[in-house]
Image: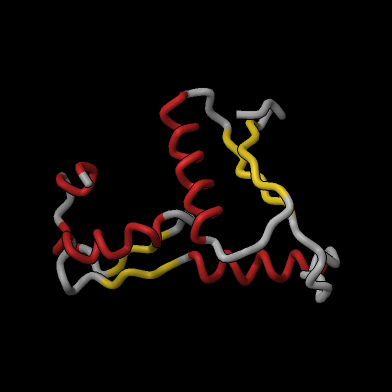
């Protein structure tokens, strides 16, 4: 939020949340930016594009309920603080995700387990 401090927000009418994790902070942004600024959530387009790519590559979800997917959270950092955040996200997903999965793990981009 410090990055917004130097901006004259009265000169802006719209902010596009262009990264997939920004919607998690939408409510915080809404609280600190002026009411006249519209927030556009770019994640909807990202999800639509993902669905299109999955369909093009025949990666649709199986209707067989006995099939349990594996999920990997990928990380590109070796910093323990970052890995701790991913482990918290994985724990949250395992606890509250509501999806029965075969395996869930965190893997570095170089293939090494975190």
Quadrant hosting residue 37:
bottom left
Q: Residue at x 76, y 65 (%)?
A: 54
Q: Position of residue 68 (x, y in %)?
A: 76, 60
Q: Is residue 6 above or below residue 31?
A: above
Camera-side residue of 108 and 15: 108
State left or right for residue 103 relative to residue 5.
right
State left or right for residue 34 relative to residue 75.
left
Quadrant hosting residue 59:
bottom right
Q: Quadrant of the C terminus?
A: top right
State left or right for residue 79 relative to residue 68.
left
Q: Position of residue 100 (x, y in %)?
A: 67, 61
Q: Is residue 70 above or below residue 106?
A: below
Camera-side residue of 27 and 89: 89
Camera-side residue of 95 and 9: 95
Q: Residue at x 81, y 67 (%)?
A: 66
Quadrant hosting residue 109:
top right
């Amino acid at each position: 939020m410090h990055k917004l401090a130097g901006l004259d927000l009265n000169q802006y009418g719209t902010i596009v949340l262009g990264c997939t994790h920004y919607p998690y902070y939408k409510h915080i942004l809404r609280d600190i930016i002026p009411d006249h600024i519209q927030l556009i959530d770019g994640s909807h387009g990202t999800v639509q594009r993902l669905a299109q790519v999955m369909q093009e590559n025949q990666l649709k979800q199986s209707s067989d309920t006995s099939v349990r997917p594996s999920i990997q959270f990928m990380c590109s950092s070796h910093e323990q603080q970052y890995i701790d955040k991913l482990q918290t996200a994985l724990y949250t997903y395992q606890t509250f995700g509501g999806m029965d999965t075969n395996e869930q793990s965190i893997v570095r981009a170089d293939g090494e387990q975190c």
